Amino acid sequence: VQLQASGGGLVQPGESLRLSCAASGSLFQRAVMYWYRQAPGKERELVASISYGSDPKYSDSVKGRFAISRDYRNKMLYLQMNDLRPEDSGVYYCSSYYRLQYWGQGTQVTVSS
């Protein structure tokens, strides 16, 4: 599985961004998909996950503001981020897991006034 994340940028607090992750390969349909983020000097943290037939899961810090979704037909993963805060800044990575874990290259999100 190859993953390509995009959609990051510089926004002001309270604004929104939508991240996208394009997946290739035949395992997308079976994989659990994740969004992680990593701020400078901090460990990578799980933001959201989605798997077939289950409700999406979110970290407490983003619950109610972020929404993860996937398009099985086009092999796309999304993260809609609303009401962004400075503490949401970091590099966002999409990841998949089916027997092995795969990572995309990351996209930078900066929330600053």
Image (spheres, helix red, strand yellow):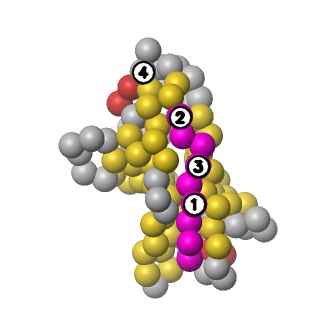
The magenta stretch is 1-9
In depth, the one of 64 and 107 nearer the eye is: 107
CA gap, disc 4 and disc 1: 25 Å
Q: Which residue is mark 3?
A: 6
CA gap, disc 2 and disc 1: 15 Å
In what element is the residue under mark 1?
Answer: strand
x and y, in percent, of residue 92 in the image: 45, 48
- Rendered image quadrant of residue 22: bottom right
Estimate how packed mark 2 is, as few (under 14), some (14 to 19) or many (20 or more) residues with alpha carbons within 10 Å: some
Using residue 27 as the reference point, say whether residue 32 is left or right of it.
Answer: left
Q: Residue at x 50, y 19 (%)?
A: 12
x and y, in percent, of residue 60 in the image: 39, 41
In depth, the one of 32 and 87 nearer the eye is: 87
Q: Tag 3: residue type?
A: Ser
Q: Which mark is residue 112?
A: 4
Q: Residue at x 45, y 66 (%)?
A: 103
CA gap, disc 4 and disc 3: 19 Å
CA gap, disc 2 and disc 3: 9 Å
Mark 2 in CB contact with mark 3 (< 8 angstroms): no
Which one is earlier in the sequence, the residue at label 4 or at label 1? Answer: 1
Q: Which mark is residue 9?
A: 2
In the picture as drawn, the residue positioned furthest to the top comes out as 113
